[in-house]
Image (cartoon, helix red, strand yellow):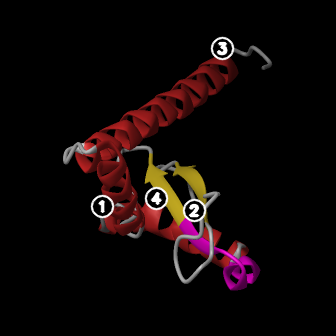
Amino acid sequence: MTLIPWQAGRPVIWDVTVACTSADSYVEASAHEAGAAAEIAATRKTAKYADLTTRFAFEPIAVGTQGLRNESPRDLLIDMGRWISMSSGNDREVHFLFQRVQLSCNDLIALCCMTVFVLKTSRLMGILV
């Protein structure tokens, strides 16, 4: 949550979700369109937090395990980067922010993939985890 009012005098809150594109709930949509798992996850988060939108500006950030993210946080990140640029005097802050977010997403994706691999390997080998 932002500490300062952001949109229409409301602070912004966000929820980050990593959607496994090969999960049963996403695999069909992912087969038809790149980024579909992230968009579905973002839509679900928006519905989940619908009652908060009167007090907060809500932004779902969803990333698929193949690295694609939903489109809606793009404007938020650009606006945040511009505010940081005005504060720091460095015009490249928008690019730096996108790079930091992408690196964080890559770390989350790697963690998810490693967890799934360990669980599946353990089950195949008959080890209870």
In the picture as drawn, the residue positioned furthest to the right comes out as 128
Of labels 4 and 1, earlier in sequence is: 4
- The numbered disc on residue 34 is 1
Q: CA distance from mark 4 to mark 1?
A: 11 Å
Q: Which residue is labeled 4 in the image?
A: 27
Q: Residue 27: say if magenta.
A: no
Depth check: 17 or 26 in front? 17
Measure the C-alpha gap from mark 2 to mark 1. Answer: 15 Å
Instruction: Rate crowding at label 1 as few (under 14), some (14 to 19) or many (20 or more) other CA atoms within 10 Å.
Output: some
Which of pointers 3 and 1 indicates the residue nearer the eye? 1
Q: Residue at x 35, y 68 (%)?
A: 75
108 is higher (above) or lower (below) than 23: above
Q: Amino acid at mark 2?
A: Ser
| x and y percentages locating residue 22 in the rendered image | 47, 49
Residue where numbered disc 2 is placed:
25
In whole angstroms, how far apart are the C-alphas of marks 3 and 1?
A: 33 Å
Nearer the observer: mark 2 or 1; the answer is: 1
| Residue at which label 3 appears | 125
Percent position (x, y) of residue 122? 67, 18
Inter-mark Cα distance, 4 to 2:
6 Å
**Residue found 32% across the figure and 43% down from its top:** 88
State how far apart marks 3 and 2 are (Cα).
Answer: 26 Å
